[in-house]
Amino acid sequence: MTIQLQDQTMTTTVREALLACGVSEHQFHGDREIHSPVTGELLLNVQSHTRADVEQAITDAHDAFLTWRDVPAPVRGQVVKRWAELLTEHKSDLASLVTAEVGKITSEAEGEVQEMIDICDFAVGQSRMLYGKTMPSERPGHRLMETWHPLGVVGCITAFNFPVAPYAWNTALALVAGDSVVWKPSAVGTLCALATQALLSRAVADCGAPEGINQLVIADPEASAPLLDDKRVALVSATGSTRMGREISPRVAQRFGRILLELGGNNAALVTPSADLDLALRGIAFAAAGTAGQRCTTMRRLIVHESVADELVEKLVAAYRTLTIGKPSDEGVLVGPLVNRRSYEDMQAALAQAKDEGGQVLVGGNRVMADEYPDAYYVEPAIVKMPAQSAIVEDETFAPILYVMTYTDLDEAIQLHNAVPQGLSSAIFTSDQTEAEIFLSARGSDCGIANVNIGTSGAEIGGAFGGEKETGGGRESGSDAWKIYMRRATNTINYSGELPLAQGVEFI
């Protein structure tokens, strides 16, 4: 069913969407208040879980894993296939929750749900392609090969800005790999998580899979500590800030658990003299202002050749002045709200620091709609012209600020591009094949994602997603990311009737 927020009160809309997805009415009461960044209003209360609840969820997930691991992988894939069918059926319901609880405009909210459907499709195919290798043995009458086996319980920690898609990236692949999953969503995204969990639980039941392979815990960091410390959680996949990654990584490593980190991004694009400026303009505007600057792949730095900088910046400033800011469910709106007051304050602090470091705000940065929605934080996306050497451009401020710098030659631009701690996404706009190849080479971008003639955001699920340096080094979604959810075994089979040793060793 299609729900539009402007037709009803938001609380009624949210309640109807949750019920449509299969969330029980009794879950609409509890100690945790869920407010919408769209208006600041209270949507619902939900019940938080205790540390004991989290421990029980891990126990239930581990018990289910012991059965699930023996189910053939193509059969496991049928659960994910059914989940995709239910996500497709309830795409509008779930997207309306993303809009209400996180503040994404409708097309972006629907796009996030579509990512979930797409990764399910990918994972169903992958369930028949969990390939190992056969290698030639140096010993006669021997076969050398590798096999892949289910890993165990996967702890999945997700962030507010993509409240459902990264969970699906992890869970669709983990389930076909034979793992069970315990999910701790962001506090902003709890309602989205309840709906997503209800749809997956229905898929599990419809397919007769073991109850318990999918667990949801709504808990604060202290209560959810067992996800980090319990040895039964074989892999912790965490999406969030670099600060969060620094806190949890040593704890998981201390017990020799696996960890998959998707952390901060401070993404940049280079614009060369040969670039199609109209193409660059469109790519930059969406990457920098989309989702109100609250994507890990948001473009935060623009490094433009001095010969085209004035022309491009003039066009960008003009384009920014036409951006429609408002309630994300309203038709024609391109920029919704920041998630909360803290995000607004962080943005203002960053702009103040940029000015102190010689920056010039060319457009934007102001709060709007404050009289109408005093408890919501809508802002004008900002463009700030910066000197090349400044500290603020090395920080990731999760808000729509685009820092513009100029360069004279490509080596200088690449050096400027790489001179930040983060390494998630990057782009170059150029019509010069040599420039493009250099940017994609070992001497070019040091990021996990490097694009040519598109922006830094909007990755497809077919490629592995993730970054280097303080982004954490993790890879999710497509390509061979499935391997992180499995354990590898190297097998040697001797059918020779003899017992030769490798490397010519003799032992009598």
Image (spheres, rainbow, N blue to C red):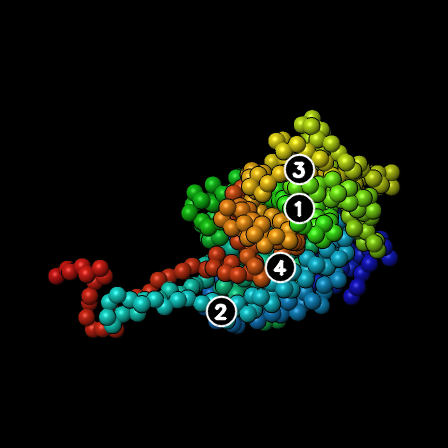
- Residue 86 seen in this snapshot: yes
The amino acid beneath tag 3 is Met
Tag 1 and tag 3, C-beta contact below 8 Å: no
The amino acid beneath tag 1 is Pro
Q: Which mark is residue 273?
A: 1
Tell me the CA gap for discs 1 and 4. Answer: 28 Å
Tell me the CA gap for discs 4 and 2. Answer: 20 Å
Most foreground residue, 417 or 170: 417
Q: Residue at x 47, y 67 (%)?
A: 130
The mark that comes first in sequence, 2 or 1, is 2
Most foreground residue, 423 or 331: 423
The mark that comes first in sequence, 1 or 4, is 1
Residue occupied by mark 2: 129
Tell me the CA gap for discs 4 and 3. Answer: 29 Å
Element type where label 2 sits in the image:
loop
Quarter of the view holding residue 508: bottom left
Q: Residue at x 60, y 63 (%)?
A: 119
10 Å neighbourhood of mark 3: few (<14), some, or many (≥20)?
Answer: many
The mark that comes first in sequence, 2 or 3, is 2
Q: Which mark is residue 405?
A: 3
Quarter of the view holding residue 18: bottom right
